[in-house]
Image: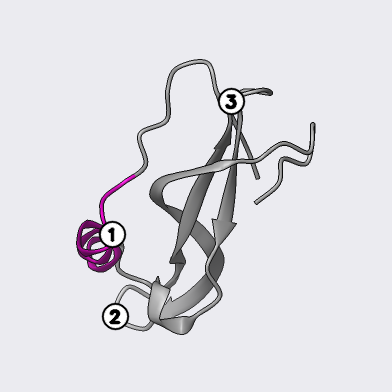
Amino acid sequence: MKCPMCGGDMKFVGWDIVVRDVYYEYDEFEDEYEQVEVYGIAGVYLCDNCRIGILDVMDDDEFVSEYYAELEEKIEQMGGFAKIPEGYTLLP
């Protein structure tokens, strides 16, 4: 992946969980709407020149869930969460 700022190569450093979507669902028992978040897995890439990071969200339904813990387990199986050094700025 190329850096959008300087055009240099970015290195893959691991995975993270992002909120992909938010919707509201009616709960008849509570008689109110509840906010539901849909999570996804994103690859994290860093540019050492610009000290920025980019999240590359995966589109495959296999990497999407309403359950955060489910994706945490999947990330551990895929090699673990990204460790982002201090001083880096993550771009959306």
**Quick one: label 3, few (<14), some, or many (20+) residues within 10 Å?**
some
Q: Position of residue 49 (x, y in %)?
A: 66, 23
Q: Residue at x 79, y 31 (%)?
A: 6
- Can you identify the residue that label 2 sits on? 29
Residue situated in front as seen by the camera: 91 or 47: 47
The image quarter in which residue 66 lies: bottom left
28 relative to 88, above or below = below
Q: Position of residue 40 (x, y in %)?
A: 45, 65
Determine contact: label 2, label 3, CB under 8 Å: no
| Coloring basis for residues | one colour
Q: Position of residue 17 (x, y in %)?
A: 41, 54
- Can you identify the residue that label 3 sits on? 48
Q: Nearer the viewer, mark 1 or mark 3?
A: 3
**In the image, is residue 80 part of the stretch drawn in magenta?**
yes
- Can you identify the residue that label 1 sits on? 75
Residue type at numbered disc 1: Ile
The magenta stretch is 69-81
